[in-house]
Amino acid sequence: MKIPELERLAEGLEEAAHLVVWEAAGRIEVVALGGEAFEDAFPLPMTVQAAAAEVGMILDTTTAARLAIEQLPDDFWESLHEVEYGEQLRVSMLGRPGKKYLHVFHAVSAGEGHDLTLLEELELTESELFQVAKWMREQSLFDHHSGDVMMKILTRLR
């Protein structure tokens, strides 16, 4: 399934780009750049930013700005779905493994008022919830004040 906004972006690119993205709540977020190995997407290369600006598109890099590539777990990159947009743009869409980490990460970041609908649709197992919580703790992604929020979200998802 091709995303119309990315088709327009591909038309404006003057050099090849490989973006790793996820769709959440009607927005497209670039979480990494592809290639021989995954690279940090923050800041986006100027050629990609310029092409996006020309078609009136803002590419969100919120996650890339907050998480370093090295902080992402190995299974984050599993089940990527690749789509070619012409000759200049290749897009890897995150699969379920990557989405589970980002949905929980953003839910905890936003706090208790965050809409958990997309996260609930993933129907995470207790083991997967434990795995995500362990990752967030090991990476020290949140201070101790966020622990209560994290536990409330994880308990609600069980």
Image: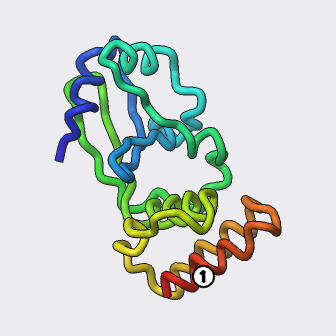
Amino acid type of the residue that numbered disc 1 sits on in the rendered structure: Phe
Residue 29 image-quadrant placement:
top left
Residue at the (45%, 38%) spot, across then down: 34
Location of residue 94 in the rendering, given as x and y in whole percent from the top left corner: 39, 54
What secondary structure is found at the residue carrying circle 1? helix
Location of residue 90 in the rendering, given as x and y in whole percent from the top left corner: 31, 34
Q: Which residue is mark 1?
A: 130
> Badge 1: few (under 14), some or many (20 or more) residues near its Cα, within 10 Å?
few
- Up the image or down, 104 lies above or below 24; here it is below
Q: Nearer the viewer, residue 7 or 36?
A: 7
- Up the image or down, 129 lies above or below 80; here it is below
* Figure coloring: rainbow
Residue extending furthest left?
Answer: 1
Residue at the (60%, 57%) spot, across then down: 110
Residue at the (17%, 48%) spot, across then down: 1
Residue 97 image-quadrant placement:
bottom left
Q: Is 76 left, or right, of 142 in this rendering?
A: left
Q: Is 140 left, or right, of 20 in this rendering?
A: right
